[in-house]
């Protein structure tokens, strides 16, 4: 059993391309960790130093280590020479694009990770009605060609798969039969809006799988060598955390976590649950928000990516320095601590979280209540799978809005659930 | 866009560099749908303009009156279009169908609505057909139904019209009445995936001189440039006011989203919803905002302060961008902006067609009280 309760400290780690940083948080005490030579500043050295700091800071030592993989993931994605496995992208839509720009991702960074593309006729509308039967002959040809390429990472997106994933699953099953051991990422696992955004999400997911596996293996070996029973957690883009086993199968969820962690870390250091945080990016002032202790997040275009993703993350927007637009109805803070310290603090204090973004169809207020309850229950199940203790979960945000210019009764529902850590998960 | 001598404040052509501003300005005039397909649509259009060259943007008066013109727009849901992107030929195919039917060759394209994605697909169609785009449209914003146009008010028929879905399937509609055309199209649009490329209101430039709303395409480009210049929201609203006449009604945080808040009118897509906003500072009022596919009324402490046909939009103060209606969250800090619509919509016939009563709110418009 891991150490738990008020007598333990938690460690937050952010992995940068050339070194790691850590901070230890014990109650209101925050201790940045700086390994002293000859200790190394890599993952292993920094975590070991952090555990030592935690042992001195808290009677129970360290309880959990939450790792922010995002800087490493982004660096790997951006560097053209980085070793990233080639990805096959499969679109399931009624018709193949007739314009080259519509046949590819608008983001060069995403497109260059795609070694081959296929389009298979099929797909559903937003409400799950089949538009075109899945083209069995096209699928058979795809499988035959894919098997000959040597590509083993496959990203699949089908129109309408959030509502009805049948075509995506059929294609995934056929590919697995043709290419045993293929690593497949399907867009229906992530929900969200927009085929291009959903495709970019699963392409990045596929591209990052091998790296994520390697880094998490390193993390687990590192923790296993250290004294005590340390629980490994992985920071998510929405500022929450998930278990390593979950992140291994959905690595894109860890993408873009740093910004949300910095916001939450700054709020924690200021002792605030609700605030606007002013930060600096490449010398430019940017701002983000924290509400009820959670970073405000949205599916958006992450900096440096060039297209939308469906996994939520904090989007920092340009802000006039020293000001809050229109006067502050919440405190505005400009943290003194460096960004990597904020990220480490945000990681150390993060909570298990989940996010759900779907389209549904309702015909009455009672049906709306039912749809909303169902979404909340599924998001709650997800957050428990991400490491929340039973009975500790809460719906942090829920939003249902009518989808404009759609048949009356079409709604978009988004649910965000957070919980308290389940400390019985160490070593899982 | 490059200035044309003697035509102050407008443009001579649309290039790939203009696409981001067009997109942002188009969103201002119809802030209903989010950005799930922004990068895809803008890269498609920019690529077309790079390959085929800039699209000339002409005043209707600059085109010979006998020139055959046709409008295009996206019919249906932007969310559906984001999830089922165009193959790319839908708008051109729709226009060609009417050309074949009428045995005419269109010499110019114009947007049915110079707002939302519909503004951009008009440029797409012009680039693909290699014809000029008219600096005019039928709505000056978006309304829910295809006969909610200045052309309809002037007696121009929307038909024959063609709707081509992303499935490649198409519908050709020939009916004498605009409202009938809309009703016939709705079911078909749902069947082909929730959206369709529409080509409608085939007519001549001579007719459009009196029937279309002028200058609305260059206007969205100008508005878009302001929006791209991310600045303090107070400054932004002031700048927008000089171009659009918009004013801030209030600033506040979204407290509540409520659905099915009124009986639904089956002729108007999207069910009625309400938004409750608590004003921060100022008078501390509680605002109730009535939504359909667009915002149709704003009440402050129970008093009507803005309503259709005003263009009512929400500016996300924290992020300095327009808040779209499909992504509102309780807790968001927003400016409620009201912008006058084009004058034609405040006429008795215009008000009857798109005013608040058409949305089940039979109150006099604030301008009329």
Image (spheres, coloured by chain):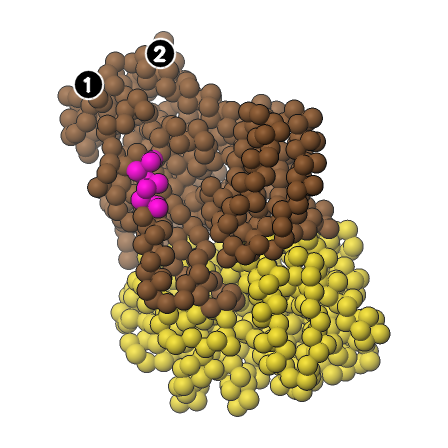
**Outermost residue toward the top in this view:** A38
Q: Mark 1 points at which residue?
A: A56
- Residues A237 and A341: in front is A237
**Quick check: B214 above or below A251?**
below
* Residue B30 image point, x, y percent: 53, 67
**Residue at 50% across, 57% down:** A127
**Which circle's residue, 1 or 2, is located before the other in the chain?**
2
Q: In this view, does A324 lie above or below A114?
A: below
Give the residue pinned by disc 2.
A39
Residue B273 tag number? none
- What shade does chain B have? yellow
Which secondary structure class fits the magenta region best? helix
On the rendered image, what quadrant is the N terminus of chain B found in? Answer: bottom right
Give the magenta-colored segment's residue range. Answer: A378-386
Q: Does the magenta stretch include residue A27?
A: no
Chain in brown (letter): A
Quarter location, residue A229:
top left
Residue at x 66% of width, y 27% of height:
A147
Residue displayed at 44% across by 57% down: A360
């Amino acid at each position: 059993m891991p150490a738990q309760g008020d007598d333990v400290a938690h460690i937050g780690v952010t992995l940068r391309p050339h070194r790691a940083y850590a901070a230890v948080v014990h109650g209101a005490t925050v201790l940045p960790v700086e390994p002293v030579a000859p200790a190394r500043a890599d993952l292993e050295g920094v975590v070991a130093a952090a555990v030592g700091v935690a042992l001195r800071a808290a009677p129970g030592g360290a309880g959990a280590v939450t790792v922010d993989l995002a800087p490493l993931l982004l660096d790997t994605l951006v560097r053209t020479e980085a070793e990233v496995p080639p990805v096959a992208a499969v679109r399931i839509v009624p018709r193949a694009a007739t314009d080259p720009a519509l046949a590819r991702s608008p983001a060069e960074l995403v497109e260059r990770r795609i070694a081959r593309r296929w389009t298979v006729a099929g797909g559903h509308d937003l409400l799950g009605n089949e538009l075109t039967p899945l083209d069995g002959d096209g699928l058979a040809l795809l499988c035959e060609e894919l098997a000959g390429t040597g590509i083993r990472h496959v990203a699949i997106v089908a129109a309408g798969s959030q509502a009805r994933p049948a075509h995506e699953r059929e294609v995934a099953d056929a590919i697995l039969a043709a290419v045993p051991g293929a690593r497949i990422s399907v867009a229906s696992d992530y929900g969200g809006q927009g085929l291009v955004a959903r495709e970019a999400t699963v392409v990045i997911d596929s591209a990052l799988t091998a790296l994520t596996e390697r880094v998490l293996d390193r993390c687990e070996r590192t923790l296993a060598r250290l004294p005590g029973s340390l629980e490994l957690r992985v920071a998510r883009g929405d500022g929450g955390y998930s278990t390593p086993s979950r992140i291994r199968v959905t690595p894109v969820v860890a993408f873009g976590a740093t910004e949300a962690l910095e916001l939450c870390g700054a709020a924690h250091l200021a002792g605030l649950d609700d605030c606007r945080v002013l930060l600096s990016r490449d010398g430019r002032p940017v701002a983000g928000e924290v509400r009820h202790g959670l970073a405000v997040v949205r599916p958006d275009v992450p900096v440096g990516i060039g297209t939308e993703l469906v996994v939520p993350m904090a989007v920092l927007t340009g802000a006039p320095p020293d000001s809050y637009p229109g006067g502050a109805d919440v405190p505005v803070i400009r943290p003194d601590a460096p960004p990597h310290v904020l990220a480490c603090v945000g990681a150390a204090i993060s909570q298990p979280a989940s996010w759900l973004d779907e389209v549904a169809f309702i015909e009455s207020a009672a049906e709306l209540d039912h749809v909303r309850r169902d979404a909340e229950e599924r998001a709650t199940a997800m957050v428990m799978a991400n490491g929340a203790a039973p009975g500790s979960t809460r719906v942090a945000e829920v939003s249902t809005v009518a989808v404009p210019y759609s048949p009356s009764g079409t709604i978009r529902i988004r649910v965000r659930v957070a919980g308290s850590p389940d400390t019985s998960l160490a070593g899982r | 866009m490059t200035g044309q001598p003697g035509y102050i404040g407008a443009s001579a052509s649309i290039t790939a560099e203009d696409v981001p501003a067009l997109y942002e300005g188009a969103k201002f005039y119809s802030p209903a749908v989010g950005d799930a397909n922004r990068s895809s649509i803008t890269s498609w259009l920019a690529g077309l303009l790079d390959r085929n060259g800039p699209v000339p943007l002409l005043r209707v008066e600059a085109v010979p009156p006998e020139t055959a013109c046709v409008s295009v727009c996206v019919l249906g849901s932007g969310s559906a279009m984001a999830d089922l992107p165009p193959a790319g030929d839908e708008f051109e195919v729709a226009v060609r169908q009417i050309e074949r039917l009428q045995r005419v060759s269109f010499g110019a394209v114009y947007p049915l609505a110079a707002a939302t994605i519909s503004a951009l697909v008009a440029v797409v169609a012009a680039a693909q057909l290699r014809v000029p785009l008219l600096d005019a449209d039928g709505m000056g914003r978006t309304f829910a139904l295809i006969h909610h146009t200045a052309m309809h008010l002037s007696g121009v028929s929307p038909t024959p019209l063609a709707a081509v879905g992303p499935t490649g399937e198409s519908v050709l509609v020939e009916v004498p009445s605009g409202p009938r055309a809309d009703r016939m199209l709705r079911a078909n649009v749902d069947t082909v995936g929730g959206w369709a490329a529409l080509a409608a209101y085939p007519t001549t430039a001579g007719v459009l001189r009196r029937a279309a709303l002028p200058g609305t395409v260059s206007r969205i480009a100008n508005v878009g440039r302001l929006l791209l210049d991310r600045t303090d929201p107070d400054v932004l609203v002031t700048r927008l006011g000089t171009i659009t006449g918009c004013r801030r009604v209030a600033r506040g945080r979204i407290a509540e989203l409520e659905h099915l808040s009124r009986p639904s009118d089956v002729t108007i897509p999207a069910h009625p919803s309400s938004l409750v906003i608590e004003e921060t500072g100022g008078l501390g009022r509680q605002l109730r905002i009535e939504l359909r596919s667009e915002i149709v009324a704003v009440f402050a402490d129970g008093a009507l302060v803005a309503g259709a046909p005003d263009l009512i939009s929400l500016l996300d103060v924290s992020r300095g961008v327009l808040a779209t209606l499909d992504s509102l969250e309780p807790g968001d800090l927003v400016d409620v902006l009201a912008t006058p619509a084009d004058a034609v919509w405040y006429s008795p016939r215009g008000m009857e067609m798109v005013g608040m009563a058409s949305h089940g709110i039979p109150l006099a418009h604030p301008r009329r009280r």
